[in-house]
């Protein structure tokens, strides 16, 4: 066979295969890849403790403030465990909240109410309810495993001078209070800069903005400020974080129902 014919045939085959070998990612594949990279960059912190001030503001501008300590335990292969302990004001002092986040099955959450001296389990169907009267839902404060959502890349966008990916994610959990969330992800550090939440009617509900990021252990980014605004009620909640410590030696025994009652 003429070599030129063979070469032409091989070239034709090669060209016909090019669209498949060089095909760009689909929006869904790119959205998932961004989420995977963000999750990967936050792996390995072990455990952490921090202090948090929660400021609640109503539509009239009246505020109330709560002081909380947060403990977190990284769980490899599943969602993290966390405990929130309320120190002030007096009417919530001693209240403690325990979360076992999971990748696929529903999160497990318990609330200890010192006035009643009992531990109350949060129904998995009530995760869209407000956490301690704030604009954060129970599902907002659980760790955000990749498997909890499906994803779609929307566009690149500059947000407050920061280059970001804009992705949309859709809760896999059927009892979620949201139909979708739009997330602005920092292109360089793969950390969230803003999240917009849409309710079950696909109506704009809330916006969460992150600010004053600090880097710990030369790897892990944490926002010192988180501001959640409810567009439907006019209420807002500001979380101010400080005194982060990592790899403090926490273990599973610090995150069980009995530890809720003795949390101090």
Image (cartoon, grey):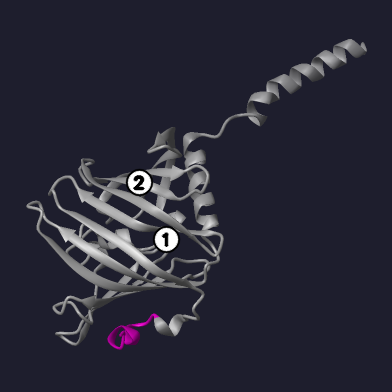
Distance CA(mark 1)–CA(mark 2):
24 Å
Residue drawn at point x = 17 percent, y = 77 percent = 92
- Which quadrant is home to the N terminus? top right
Q: Residue at x 31, y 58 (%)?
A: 140
Give whichever of discs 1 and 2 has the lower sequence position. Answer: 1
**Mark 2, secondary structure of its residue:** strand
Q: Is residue 5 above or below residue 135?
A: above
Estimate the x, y position of residue 233 in percent, counting from the top left.
12, 49
Which label belongs to residue 70?
Answer: none
Check residue 259 for magenta coloring.
Answer: yes
Q: Which residue is at a point 47% across and 81% down the rendered structure image?
A: 251
**Left or right of 31 in this view: 15:** right
Q: Which residue is the site of mark 2? A: 194
Residue 32 vs residue 209: left or right?
right
Segment tinted magenta in the rendering = 255-264
User: Residue 169, how many percent across, how many down?
Assistant: 38, 45
Q: Position of residue 253 (x, y in %)?
A: 43, 85
Say left or right for 88 vs 108. left
| Nearer to the camera, 13 or 226 | 226
Question: Which residue does the numbered mark 1 point to in the structure image?
Answer: 104
Tell me where residue 143 appears, x and y as whole percent. 39, 62
Label count reads 2
Choose mark 1 or mark 2, whichever is in front. Answer: 2
């Amino acid at each position: 066979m003429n070599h030129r014919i063979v070469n032409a045939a091989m070239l034709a085959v090669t060209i016909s295969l090019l669209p498949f070998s060089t095909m760009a990612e689909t929006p869904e594949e790119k959205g998932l890849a961004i989420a995977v990279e963000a999750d990967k960059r936050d792996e390995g912190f072990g455990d952490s403790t921090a202090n948090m001030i929660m400021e609640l503001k109503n539509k009239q501008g009246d505020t109330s403030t709560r002081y909380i300590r947060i403990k977190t335990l990284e769980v490899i292969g599943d969602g993290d465990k966390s405990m929130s302990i309320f120190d002030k004001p007096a009417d919530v002092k001693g209240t403690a909240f325990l979360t076992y986040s999971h990748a696929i099955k529903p999160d497990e959450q318990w609330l200890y109410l010192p006035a009643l001296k009992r531990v109350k389990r949060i129904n998995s169907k009530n995760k869209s309810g407000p956490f301690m009267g704030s604009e954060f839902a129970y599902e907002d404060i659980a760790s955000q495993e990749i498997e909890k959502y499906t994803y779609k890349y929307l566009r690149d966008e500059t947000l407050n001078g920061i280059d970001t990916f804009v992705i949309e994610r859709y809760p896999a959990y059927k009892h979620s209070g949201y139909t979708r969330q739009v997330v602005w992800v920092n292109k360089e550090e793969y950390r969230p800069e803003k999240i917009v939440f849409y309710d079950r009617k696909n109506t704009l509900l809330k916006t969460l903005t992150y600010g004053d990021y600090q880097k710990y252990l030369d790897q892990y980014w944490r926002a010192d400020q988180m501001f959640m605004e409810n567009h439907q009620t006019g209420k807002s909640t500001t979380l101010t974080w400080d005194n982060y410590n990592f790899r403090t030696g926490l273990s599973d025994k610090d995150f069980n129902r009995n530890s809720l009652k003795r949390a101090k």
